[in-house]
Amino acid sequence: MVTHASTRQEATALLSAKPYDLALVDISLPDGNGFAVCTELKQAQKIPVIFLTASGDESSVVTGLNMGADDYIIKPFRPRELIARIQTALRKSGPASAAVEICGLHVDTASGVVKKDGKEVFLSALEYRLLLVFLNNPKNILTRDRLLSELWDASGEFVTDNTLTVYIKRLREKIEDNPAAPQIILTVRGTGYRLGGSYVSK
C-alpha cells in the first residue's frame, strides 16, 4: 500500500500513524525541504529513504547520502529505474552495523565519514556508493553485471562497464595501502570482485 503526503507537515503526521517499509522523498516541498523530512524519518522509523529531486549537483547528492539516504534519483527518471532502486534499497534494509573496519579502513555509515589509518578519506558520491555495495555484501562475489545493476551515476544514467573499471581503480587508490596489490577490494578473475581482509562490524 502506498501513502502520499504533499507537504512536510503531512509527512510528519503520517510517520506517527503507522510503520512504513520505505520513503520516497522529494527535496522541494511547499512548507520545507526533503532533508528535514529525512531527518524526521530516520528519528521515527529505521527505513530506507530515497531522495527524488530535480537537483543533480554533487553537493546535494553527498548531503542526502550523508544524512542517511539510501539512494538519490534525478528527475526526469524512467519508471523501471525507480522500481529497481526501490527494490535494491528494500533488499539492503536489513539490520546493519553503523561502523565497519577493514584493513585500516574505518567507515561510519551513520555520518558518511571514511578514514584510512585515522586520516579522513574524501570520496565522491559514486565512490562512496560503490564502497557501500561491497560493505553490504561482505561474503559475496559481486559480478560486474551485479555492480552495474546496483550502481548509478549522479545523472541517473546507467554506469557503463568502462566507468565501473575507472571507479574501482579510483576507489582502490584512495583506500588501499598498495592499489597495485589490493587487500580490501579483490578481483575474482573471470567473475568480478569481492571484499577482502578482516571485516569487523561495530
Image (spheres, grey):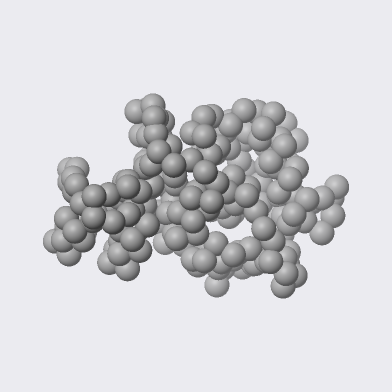
Residue 108 occupies which quadrant of the picture?
bottom right
**Is residue 12 something one can see in this rendering?**
yes
Residue drawn 85% across the image and 47% down it: 180
| Residue 80 locus on image (x, y percent) | 37, 27
User: Quick check: 35 above or below 57?
Assistant: below
Residue 10, given in percent of the width and then of the height, sits at: 16, 55
Q: Quadrant of the N terminus?
A: top left
Pick whichever, 169 or 67, lies toward us. 67
Count numbered badges in the picture. Answer: 0
Q: Is residue 144 left or right of residue 173?
A: left
Residue drawn where x is 16% and y is 61% of the image: 13
Q: Using the image, determine if residue 150 lies above or below residue 136.
A: above
Q: Say which of 1 and 160 sits in front.
A: 160
Quadrant hosting residue 40:
bottom left
Q: Can residue 140 be seen in this view?
A: no
Q: Position of residue 202 (x, y in %)?
A: 55, 72
Residue found at x 19% / y 48%: 5
User: Horizontal placement of 52 versus 146: left or right?
Assistant: left
Q: Is residue 146 above or below residue 37?
A: above
Residue 166's x, y, as percent? 72, 37
Left/right of residue 42 with respect to residue 72 in the rendered view = left
